Amino acid sequence: LELLQEATFVKINFVEITIDYREEFREQFSQYVPTGMPCGNYSVNYLHMGRFFQYLMFRHPAVAEYDYLWRLDADIETRLGIPCDVFDIMVRSHAVLGYYYYSDYDHHNCGLYEGRNATYKYAREHGFSPNHLDILPPQSAYMGFWGVFDMAFWRSPPVMAFSDYIDST
């Protein structure tokens, strides 16, 4: 972590995250030690990772002061560097999400179908169309190893309500 901080001139916050589950699952999962099992088995690691990056991250006090958040997986390599200012691109394009690319490989689709179905159900119940899902091919998902988020959008009441819904499913 020290090497990463030394490699940049910007402020980087490192925060240790405690594994957490919805209250009704805490007792059930507390007996499991996190492992490196693949997501196809819905391991404890994968369930926590999904919940954190799709729900808890936007509510975490460590990111409350930021307008944008750039999330990188711990094992990502940037051999050629980042050829652009991702935050400038987000601002100029009025984007709420920046991502690397999508995947149509089965091993990246863990929870994809359940998530899409829950999204479409919520949209029907609340009178809107989730057009962002139409951008991607049917058997694909956004890759999660890095993403840039406009925090005003992701912390807005409608998005938080949707996030609460998905977390409850």
Image: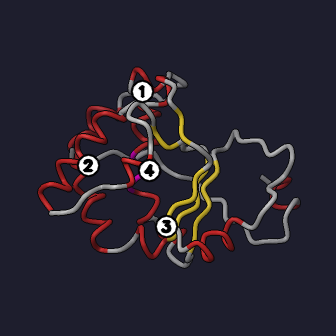
**Quarter placement of the C terminus:** top left
Labels 2, 1: front one: 2
The answer for how far apart the CA atoms under marks 3 and 2 are is: 18 Å
Which SS class for mark 1? loop
Along the horizontal axis of the image, is 62 left or right of 159?
Answer: right
- Helix, strand, or loop for circle 3? loop
- Residue at 86% of width from left, 47% of height from top? 80
Q: Magenta: predominant secondary structure element?
A: helix
Mark 4 closeness class: few <14, some 14–19, many ≥20 residues within 10 Å: some
Report the mark closest to the observer, 4 or 2.
2
Q: Which residue is mark 4?
A: 52
Left or right: residue 90 versus residue 48 is right
- Please identify the residue farthest to the left as the structure is shown: 125
The one of 67 and 29 positioned closer to us in this rendering = 67
Q: Which mark is residue 43?
A: 1
In magenta, the rendered stretch is 51-55
Sequence-wise, which precedes: disc 4 or disc 3?
A: 4
Give the x, y percent position of residue 107. 49, 24
Q: Quadrant of residue 39?
A: top left
Give the distance between the C-alpha atoms of the residues marked 4 and 3, in whole angstroms: 18 Å
Labels 2 & 1 near each other (Cβ < 8 A): no
The answer to which of marks 1 and 4 sits earlier in the sequence is 1
Q: Quadrant of residue 29?
A: top left
- Label 3, on which residue? 96
Q: Tell me if label 3 and label 2 are in contact, CB under 8 Å.
A: no
Mark 2, residue position: 119
